[in-house]
Amino acid sequence: MNKRSIIYLILGLVLLAGTVGIFSSRFDLTKEKRYTLSSSSLQVLKNVQKPLMVEVYLDGDFPANFKQLQNETRFMLEEFRKINSNIDFKFIDPIKTKMSQDTLMAMGMQPSILPDMKDGQVRQIVIFPYVALKYQEFGSSVPLIVQQSGIDATEQLNKSIEYLEYNLISNIKSIAQENRKNVGILINQDELGPEEFQGFMQMALESYNAGPVVPEQGDELTQADIPKLKKMDALVIAKPRKPFTDGEKVILDQYIMNGGKTLWMMDAVNAEMDTLTRSKKIMAYPIDLNMNDFFFNYGVRINSALVKDVQKFALLRLVTGEVSGNPQYTSLPWPYFPLGIAENNHPVTRNINPVKFEFPTAIEILERPGIKTEILYESSPRTILKTVPNYVDLKELSKPDSIGVNERASDSKIFAVALNGEFSSAYANRSERNAYPDFKPKSTENRMIVISDGDVGRNKIIKGNPLPLGYDLLTNQQFGNEQFLRNALDYLLDDANLMELRNRNIEARLLDRQRIDNEKTNWQWFNLLLPLAIIGVLGALFFLLRKRKFA
C-alpha cells in the first residue's frame, strides 16, 4: 500500500467516524452567539453529580412555529448531554402516549390551545409545552413558554427561545444543587402573617431553604440572634409595622457588613385597601419605623408622600349596581395602585408581567461613593404626589386624574431600587460599635433591594384560602409580583451569574409569509431539479475526463 492510499484511507475513516457520530464539532457563527453556552451554564451542568432525566412534552403534531422551539430545545439538551453524561433527555408526545390531561395537570402543567390553519381549515391543537426534570426523588415542571401579557404569539415565542438557556439552567441548578442557600424571613416587627406571605414562601422554597427568623429573647433582635443570622445568606423584611430599635439596627447593619443580602418591602404610609373598601374613606398617615438614618447611609430615602399614577395603574373592581338582586361589577382606574412596567433591561424586571403596587411612596436616591444604584420600577411622567396625613376616598374613582387637597403634579417617582457595591457601616464612627463584637466598618461587594411598598409580596386571602401571589380574583389578572420577587432573590443570591442570561437578546429572523406563499411552487421545483442538474454535470464531466484519458 503506497503513501497516497494510506492518506486516502485515513481520510475515509475520519469521514466515516464523523458520519456515524463518533465525534462532532459545531461552530457558532451567529452574532449573538445563540448556540454557545455561557460559562455560568457550563459550571451548573458540570456540578450535576447524579443522573438527571429531562422529559420534554413538545413532540407530535403542532404548528410550525413551535417546531422552532422544539428544535432549539433539542439542540440545547444535546449540548447539555455533551457537557455532562449524567444528563439525558427524551421527547414525549402526550397525545400519542395517551397521557391524560389530569395526569399532566397534576404534574403542574397547563395546556395551551392553539389554532392551526391547514389546507383552508382551522382546527385546535392542545399541547403541553413543558419540561419535566427528574433528579433522584425530586421532580419539577418547567414551562417552555414565557408568560407575559401584552405581546403577540410571535414575540412570545421569540422571548421563550431567548430565555430557554436561563430557564433550563436555573431550574437544573435548583433541583440538582447539593447545598441550598438559606433565606430568613424576619418575624419581629409585625410583618406580614403566614397566610398573607404563603405565596412568597412557596416560591422561595422552590430554590432555597426559607424559614422565619424569630428573636431568641423577647420581641427584639439581640446579640443572641447573631449566630442564627450568620447562617442566613439573605434576609427578607416584609411590611414591618413596628419601629426598629437602635440595637436592632446595629445588628442588621453588621449583618449587611458581613455579606448578608437584604430584600426590604417597606411601607412609609398606613393605608389599607381592606379598610377603605369597608369604610369608603380612610385617613392615610405616615409610619415612623425609625429607619430613615439607616437607609440614608446606603443612599436611599423613602419619602412618605403617596404616589398616584394616572397613566399606568391597576383596575379596581367594585359593586356599582344591582339587577334583579344580582350585584353588578365595574372595573375602574385606581391610581393608588400603580403598575410597575419595566422600561430598561435589568435582569430582575425584564420581560415579566406588570407588577402591582398598592399605595406605594417615592424612593429618593442619594449618591454614595462605592455604591451603584439601579432603578427597577418607577411611575409614569403623569404622577401626582399626595402629602399625608390626608384622606383617601373611593369617590376619587370618578376623577382619577384630578388634583385634590395637598396634592401636586410631579415627575416620575421610584418604587424599587437595587443597590450593589461596598457598603459602609452607619455606625463606623458612633459609640454603638463598641457593643458589637468583631465590628466591621465596611462590607465586601454586596447587594440590597429596597421596595417602597410592603404589599408587593402579600397574596390575597379569600374565605381563608390564600390566592397565588400577584393574582387578582376580581379582575382575573395575574400580575408579575411573584416573578419579580423570584428574580429579586435570584439577583441577590446569584453566585453563578445566571441572571446575565436573562438579558440575552436573540434577534428574530422571520420569513416573509406572503413571499413564501407566492414563490412556494418555484422553490419546490428549484430544490427538485438542482440536485439532478448537479449530478448530470458531474456525470458529464467524469465521462469527458475518462474519455480524454483513455482516448
Image: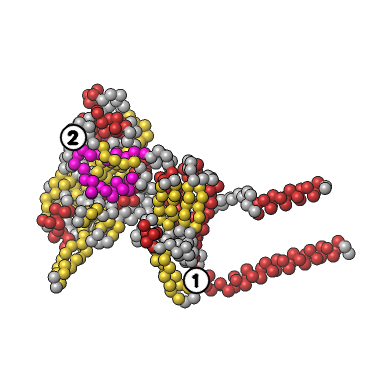
Q: Which residue is mark 1?
A: 514
Q: Which mark is residue 219?
A: 2
Please state the horizontal and vertical placement of residue 231, each as a whole percent of the image.
33, 33
Please state the horizontal and vertical placement of residue 496, each as a whole percent of the image.
43, 41
The secondary structure type at the circle numbered 1 is: helix
Using residue 435 as the reference point, say whether residue 496 is left or right of it. Answer: right
Q: Quadrant of residue 293?
A: top left
- Answer above or below: position of 370 versus 535: above
Please state the horizontal and vertical placement of residue 512, each as a whole percent of the image.
50, 67
Q: Which residues are magenta?
A: 181-205
Question: Foreground residue, 275 or 469?
Answer: 469
Q: Residue at x 18, y 41 (%)?
A: 190
Q: Which quarter of the rendered picture does the C terminus lie within?
A: bottom right
Q: Quadrant of residue 240?
A: top left
Please state the horizontal and vertical placement of residue 220, each as a whole percent of the image.
19, 33
- Answer above or below: position of 547 versus 195: below
Question: Foreground residue, 461 or 517?
Answer: 461
Using residue 346 as the reference point, say whether residue 284 is left or right of it. Answer: left
